[in-house]
Amino acid sequence: MNRFFVLLAATLALLTLTPLAALLFGASPMDIVTAAADADVLLAVATSLACAAVATALALVLGGAAGYVLARRLVRGRRLIEALLDLPVVVPHPVIGLGLLLVLARGRLLGAALEDRLGLAVASAAPGIVLCMLVVSAPFVVKAALEGFRAVPMSAVNVAATLGAPPWRRFTTIELPMAWPQIRAGAVLAWARAVSEFGSVVVFAYYPRTAPVLIWDRFSAHGMRAALAPATLLMLTCLLVFLALRWLADGGPRVQELER
């Protein structure tokens, strides 16, 4: 039985890692170095990383609050709201981009109002990229916060209340610290989802180009060879950042490791 499960796990690992390994060995080291010196590639990678960081920070605040509300059943129709917040995971992301265009394009009412009154352009601008990334990545934080706050024993919260602790103190000293490990793990997944977003960004924002959009542009215009090196560079960058985030989410170095 154990061997059967090992075989299934190995099959999944093979299916997942084979195309990534092919990508890694498909570009020559010189091509990767050239891509790393390409100003357009560096700008696209930096745009992806920066916008994903902002989107993740917003997802932590907004998604964490949504998870708390759902966990504590502070609103009616909780199950419906939870399903709606999960919808971006199911809906094809170009559809999300089209929906954002209908609301926030420069010729639309809300988009025109933001640009005229606040001077804020959302479509085809960095705020649009952040918004796309936020929409597709927030469900990971909402789900993590929901499960984290739901796991907090209400007995501890009630004891603090009987001792006179106000709601904000109960939240900051009991509920949030106990739920934080799961929220933090959800934030790591949200960042990973945000930095890889393509479908909604290419429809709604496009410029400034993120790394996935730039890779698609070069593949469409010049073929696979032109896209291989930027794709490999993005994969390696994301891998390093993701490993660092996972390490931080797991609490950094263990005490035993520090004592060695």
Image (cartoon, rainbow, N blue to C red):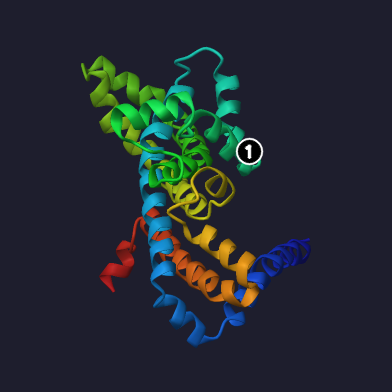
Q: How many marks?
A: 1
Q: Position of residue 164 (x, y in %)?
A: 21, 16
Relative to 202, is 65 on the left or the right? left
Q: Where, by quadrant of the figure, is residue 240 drawn?
A: bottom left
At label 1, which amino acid type do we have?
Val
Helix, strand or loop at label 1? It is: helix
Q: Where, by quadrant of the figure, is residue 128 drawn?
A: top left
Is 184 placed above or below 14 here? above
Q: Which residue is mark 1?
A: 95
Q: Position of residue 199 (x, y in %)?
A: 59, 48
Local crowd size for mark 1, using a 10 Å CA cut-off: few (<14), some (14–19), many (≥20): some
Relative to 205, is 39 on the left or the right? left
Q: Position of residue 137 (x, y in %)?
A: 50, 43
Is 172 placed above or below 42 here? above
Q: Where, by quadrant of the figure, is residue 158 drawn?
A: top left
Residue at image position (52%, 50%) is 193
Residue at image position (49%, 67%) is 234
Relative to 207, is 81 on the left or the right? right
Is 42 placed above or below 192 here? below
Residue at image position (36%, 54%) is 50
Given residues 127 and 67, the one toward you in this image is 127
Which residue occupies the extreme top position in the image? 76
Quadrant containing the C terminus is bottom left
Q: Position of residue 121 (x, y in %)?
A: 38, 38
Given residues 172 and 234, the one toward you in this image is 234
Given residues 178 and 217, the one toward you in this image is 217
Quadrant containing the N terminus is bottom right
Which residue occupies the extreme left position in the image? 164
Residue at image position (55%, 50%) is 202
